[in-house]
Amino acid sequence: MKIGILGAGALGCAMGGVLTEAGHEVWLINRHAGQVDVMNTRGLILRTGGIDRTVAVRAAATAGPVGTVELVIVLVKSFHTAEAMQAALSLLGPQTTVLSLQNGLGHEDVLAGIVGRERLLAGKTYVGGTQLAPGHVIAGTVNKLTLIGELDGGVSARVRRMADVFNQAGLDTTVSDNIMGAIWDKLLVNVATGALSAISRLPYGLLYQSPELQACAVAAVSEAMAVARASGVTLSIAEPGDAWRMAGAGLPYEFKPSMLQSLEKGSRTEIDYINGAVVRQGEKVGVPTPVNQTLVACIKGIERGLPR
């Protein structure tokens, strides 16, 4: 299958690398030309279990050189979704499927307005990636679940095919008939660790040694679960502590979530689409979210202090 990964940062490279190893024609689209040059010249280095391996990949700074693909996996930062998809319309052929695996809530509506709802699959992945250097990524792909589904909850031939492609590459993937529930489940995992790691500047190894941080994480997730239930969403995560445990399961000591990676690079985070989404939805359904409001405020304060 010919696949374009739109927004091939650490996570996109981790997934794209293993899909390439499985024999698919994968294009890693990353707007940073320097990273593209490194990957095209030297290859992509994936680190799994502390061991590095090099994968010969195709990379491009824009969609132009790629041509049409069968599947577009959207992994750009939430606030770049519309701009990135508009610039990548050349990837779309008559039968192209667009799959969002982004963090947070609301991307499907943005993408539907650009490519048409009929093209879309939604999904959530617990695969992790941490960039060590340009073209060098820790790939947290082992035993990390990905869920994909049709927006209407149906189980179609195309979604089964995409799941088969992922599974054959070693990406543990399940077709969901409750994809909005799956999106909220993943949101809970992001709520548990993303902002707290970014505020404390701690990788997972140190984050998970702090009972105070764990208590704060569980409180934030508890709020988010109350909001989801008040919104009529069916969750598979039963207890707030489960989200905390799921977030760190199988990931190395040095792993850093994307929110911390963003701040370390001096760039904006996706806080508005994660904890901020919980706050906004809580306001709509009348559920208070003081812990998430505080986490949002702290991240906003850090962002304001970043070099401009």
Image: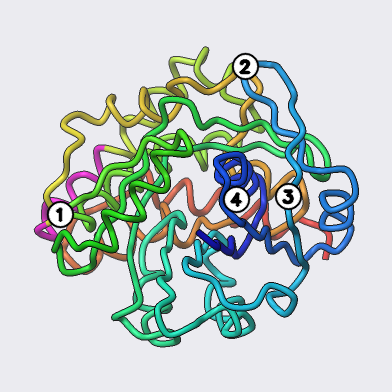
Q: Residue at x 70, y 48 (%)?
A: 263
Q: Which of 161 and 104 is in front in this view?
A: 161
User: Most prominent secondary structure in the magenta stretch?
Assistant: helix
Residue type beneath disc 4: Gly
Going from the N terminus, do you reach mark 3 or mark 4 first? Answer: 4
Figure quadrant of residue 84: bottom right
Kindly report the distance in space between the C-alpha atoms of the residues bearing marks 2 and 4: 18 Å
According to the picture, the residue beneath numbered tag 1 turns out to be: 177
Q: Name the residue under label 3.
A: 57
Tell me, yes or no, if residue 57 can be seen here: yes
User: In whole angstroms, how far apart are the C-alphas of marks 1 and 3?
Assistant: 33 Å
Q: Which amino acid does label 2 sit on?
A: Gly
Q: Which residue is the site of mark 4?
A: 12
Q: Which of marks 3 and 4 is in front?
A: 3
Mark 4, secondary structure of its residue:
helix
* Image quadrant in which the C terminus is located: bottom right
Where does the image place residue 42, in percent across and percent down from the top left?
Answer: 88, 43
Q: Residue at x 66, y 60 (%)?
A: 27
Q: How far apart are marks 1 and 4 (CA)?
A: 25 Å
Image position of 150 with respect to 24: above or below: below
Query: Foreground residue, 158 or 300?
Result: 158
In the image, the segment drawn in magenta is 222-232
Query: Is tag 2's residue or tag 4's residue first in the polypeptide sequence?
Result: 4
Res 49 label: 2
The earlier-in-sequence mark between 1 and 3 is: 3
Please, what is the three-letter code of the amino acid marked with disc 3? Val
Labels 3 and 2 touching (C-beta < 8 A): no
